[in-house]
Amino acid sequence: DIVMTQSPDSLTVSLGERATINCKSSQSVLYSSNNKNYLAWYQQKPGQPPKVLISWASTRESGVPDRFSGSGSGTDFTLTISSLQAEDVAVYYCQQYYSNPRTFGQGTKLEIK
Amino acid sequence: EVQLVESGGGLVQPGRSLTLSCAASGFTFDDYAMHWVRQVAGKGPEWVSGISWNRDNIVYADSVKGRFTISRDNTNNYLFLQMNSLRVEDTAFYYCAKDASGTYGPFDYWGQGTLVTVSS
């Protein structure tokens, strides 16, 4: 199984500041035949299911604000929120869909300072 | 509008069975793989099982293999999860999730979940 490890476990950032969350996979999720990274980022707010923000490591989903961006390749990935807004308080998860079982990171709780 | 509505959760004793259903609408159901994902309150999501658009590829997490069975009805747009020999550790919210592709993609839509509680 591919193990996904996020850092940090929690993060406190001031409004308007940058937030950065890291995700490391135990093996590469880059599929060489199409050069795509099978990595997604989800946001989960209390009482709601997860919502996909970023797919293929760096493709922002429709309707997701452009302050959210994803980067990285192979085994190391980053979710960046360029200017934190109050509504971004949530838990963020990375997930690989390169192979089964589809595994999630343990989550990063993002709070406002 | 894509909608996924789970049902069938509830309180069940250890060792008993339960079947979850997910009614899908707003998209061409038989074009996409579907999944069940569970989540214990305060913990991260755990993928449980997935089924490809044509049922050719069915996979399970080791924690449920041999006890749970995923299936789909492409005529009536339903996804199911038959859960047998339930254990206390199966207690969680169970979400139905749509894959963005027919086989391997991110989960682009989720239902609101149904709570399964396994307790004596």
Image: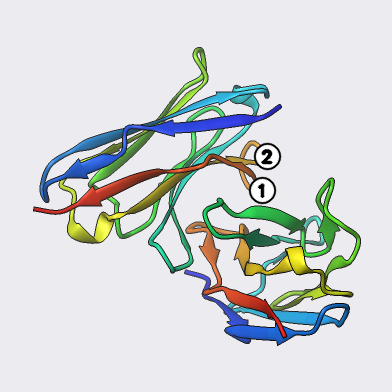
Query: What residue is shown with label 2?
Result: B101
Quadrant of the rendering where the N terminus of chain B is positioned: top right
- Seen at 66% across and 85% down, the residue is A11
> For this view, does A46 lie left or right of residue A61?
left
Chain letter of disc 1? Answer: B
- Pointer 2 with pointer 1, Cβ within 8 A: yes
Q: Residues within 10 Å of mark 1 (few under 14, many from 20)?
A: many
* Residue B34, image x, y percentages: 53, 38
Mark 1 lies on a secondary structure that is: loop
In the displayed structure, does residue A89 sit left or right of residue B23? right
| Relative to B26, residue A37 above or below | below
At a point 14% along the width and 54% down the height, the residue shown is B119
Q: Name the spot of residue B64 as percent of width and height, x first.
A: 29, 53
Q: CA distance from mark 2 to mark 1?
A: 5 Å
Residue type, numbered disc 1: Gly
> In which quadrant of the rendered view does residue A24 lie?
bottom right
Q: Chain of mark 2?
A: B
Q: Is residue B20 above or below residue A33?
A: above
**Residue plotted at (88% across, 74% down):** A83
Labels 2 and 1 positioned on one and the same chain: yes
Which residue is drawn at the image coordinates 75% and 63% (left, top)? A87
Q: Is residue A31 visible?
A: no
The image position of residue A85, as x and y in percent, is: 82, 69
Residue pointed to by mark 1: B105
Q: Nearer the viewer, residue B52 or A21?
A: A21
